[in-house]
Image (cartoon, helix red, strand yellow):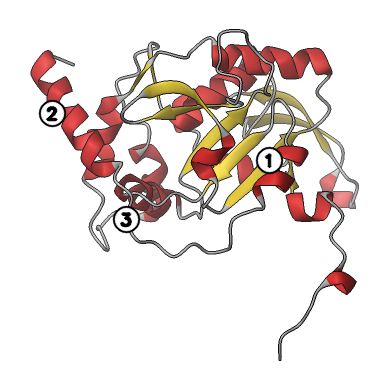
Amino acid sequence: MNRVARSIGKLLATYLSKEIEIKGTAPPSNPLHLQATLRPGDVLLVEGNTRLSTAIKYLTQSTWSHAALYVGLDSSNNLPSDHCLVDADTVHGVRSIGLEKFANLHTRICRPIGLSHEERIAVSQAAISKIGYQYDLHNVFDLARYLFPAPPVPTRFRRQLLSLGSGDPTLAICSTLIAQAFQSIRYPILPLQLKHDGMLAKGYAFQPTAFKPRHYSLLTPRDFDVSPYFAIIKPTVECGFNFHDLEWVE
């Protein structure tokens, strides 16, 4: 991307990243519960409230428009003491941030299953190593075209519209940044299943035994939510919710 196009892209990214009035589908999680529940390697999905979020939610037909990777509060000596997430921002590129960034937004925790402590650290470090990379502004141009109330885009083509970026490995968008981190330890998100071990026709459960990873540019925040390899963790439940403690107002 040449200098003029990049300058235009940055102006467009700044415009699209402005917050707008959007009513969330659910209330935000208690920040203290969120902090107590998150573990390194967890993916935090966010229901964003920017113009860009509107396009991503439309194209993916999902609540989730953004994703960040939780790396912990002591993951690196180079990060500020209160920074525990890594994400890719349209304006600032790949960066580290604190939980307060999403304090007023609806979020969801998606947790990979069966990772050892060392593997969680490896995923976290893979994301941390990308801090400072630029956001793929080609994707900004692509997404900006789909901010109309009802753009005439058939459902089967919507996923491809999120993979129209430059493909430059030094550029990143939020979901591909995290997908690459998990691919570094060969952890599946939504792989193509090539072979199954079992007999589905006879009613037996079957497990995939061979995988082919999807290209990281084809993965979106929604895919972590629907993946069979990530558990949905709800902070309110994890922190001991008891409905008997509620006070109902007539």
Tell me, for residue 242, which label it has, or none: none
| Residue matched to label 3 | 20
Q: Nearer the viewer, mark 1 or mark 3?
A: 3
Q: Is residue 4 visible?
A: yes
Which image quadrant: the C terminus? bottom right
Query: Distance between the Cα atoms at labels 2 and 3?
Result: 21 Å
Q: Which residue is found at the position 24% from the left and 36% from the top?
A: 14
Query: Distance between the Cα atoms at labels 1 and 3?
Result: 26 Å
Question: What's under tag 2, amino acid-wise?
Answer: Ile
Q: Is residue 161 left or right of residue 247?
A: left
Expressed as whole percent of the image width and height from the top left, the position of residue 75 reads: 67, 15
Tell me, for residue 110, which label it has, or none: 1
Please tell me whether residue 59 is drawn above or below residue 193 in the rendered image: below
Q: Which residue is found at the position 27% from the left and 63% from the top?
A: 150
Please tell me whether residue 27 is drawn above or below residue 67 in the rendered image: below
Expressed as whole percent of the image width and height from the top left, the position of residue 230 reads: 72, 38
Expressed as whole percent of the image width and height from the top left, the position of residue 182 reads: 63, 21
Q: Is residue 234 visible?
A: no
Front-most of 164 and 170?
170
Judged from the image, the secondary structure of the residue bearing numbered disc 2 is helix
Expressed as whole percent of the image width and height from the top left, the position of residue 117 reads: 82, 17
Please tell me whether residue 232 is drawn above or below residue 247 in the rendered image: above
Query: Distance between the Cα atoms at labels 2 and 1?
Result: 35 Å
Q: Nearer the viewer, mark 2 or mark 3?
A: 3
Q: Is residue 54 left or right of residue 119?
A: left
| Residue matched to label 2 | 8
Q: Earlier in the sequence, mark 2 or mark 1?
A: 2
